[in-house]
């Protein structure tokens, strides 16, 4: 699986509209690192209007807040997810 083709189209579709991309947390999946790097690469190339919410980093030390699949958050993990996305968007807003 490669996230690059799909993510490479994104900036052309949204133009200069501000938005965020979220990294994945799927440690048992062989594609996690490739997808997360693609997210970070696209955001870096479009840093004036694309923020990264690093869900993988945020939840890695709180895996007890994930469902049995080690991917999807339970309610307490959902708060970390929401806070991570909100922080990334707030940082983007502050830099514009």
Image (cartoon, grey):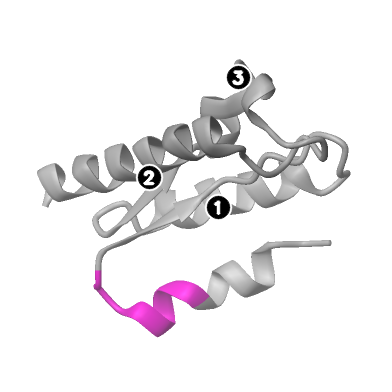
**Closer to us: 64 or 13:** 64
Task: Specify the label residue 39 is tagged with.
Answer: 1
Q: Is residue 16 magenta?
A: yes
Mark 1 vs 2, N-terminal side = 1
**Closer to us: 8 or 28:** 28
Query: Where does residue 14 sit, x and y in percent of width and height?
Result: 35, 79
Does residue 51 sit above or below 63 in this rendering? below
Secondary structure, mark 3, is: loop
Residue segment shown in magenta: 10-17
Secondary structure, mark 2, is: helix
CA gap, disc 2 and disc 3: 16 Å
Q: Is residue 63 magenta?
A: no
Asked whether, in this view, residue 68 is left or right of residue 57, the answer is right
What residue is shown at x 62% (from left), y 39% (from top)?
73
Does residue 79 sit above or below 4 in this rendering? above
Does residue 65 sit above or below 12 in this rendering? above
Query: Where does residue 41 sit, x and y in percent of width and height?
Result: 53, 50
List the residue tagged with mark 2: 85
Residue at far bottom of view: 13
List the residue tagged with mark 3: 62
Task: Specify the label residue 2 is tagged with.
Answer: none
Q: Residues within 10 Å of mark 2 (few under 14, many from 20)?
A: many
Q: Disc 2, disc 3: CB below 8 Å?
A: no
Residue at far front of view: 75
Which mark lies nearer to you, 1 or 2? 2
Query: Where does residue 53 sit, x and y in percent of width and height?
Result: 43, 43
The total of numbered circles placed on residues is 3
Chief secondary structure of the magenta portion: helix
């Amino acid at each position: 699986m490669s996230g690059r083709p799909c993510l490479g189209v994104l900036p052309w579709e949204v133009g200069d509209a501000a938005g965020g991309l979220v990294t994945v947390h799927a440690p048992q999946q062989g594609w996690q690192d490739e997808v997360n790097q693609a997210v970070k690469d696209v955001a870096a190339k479009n840093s004036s209007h694309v923020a990264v919410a690093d869900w993988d980093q945020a939840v890695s030390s709180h895996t007890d807040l994930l469902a049995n699949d080690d991917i999807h958050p339970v309610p307490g993990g959902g708060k970390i997810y929401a806070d991570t996305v909100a922080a990334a968007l707030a940082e983007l807003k502050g830099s514009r």
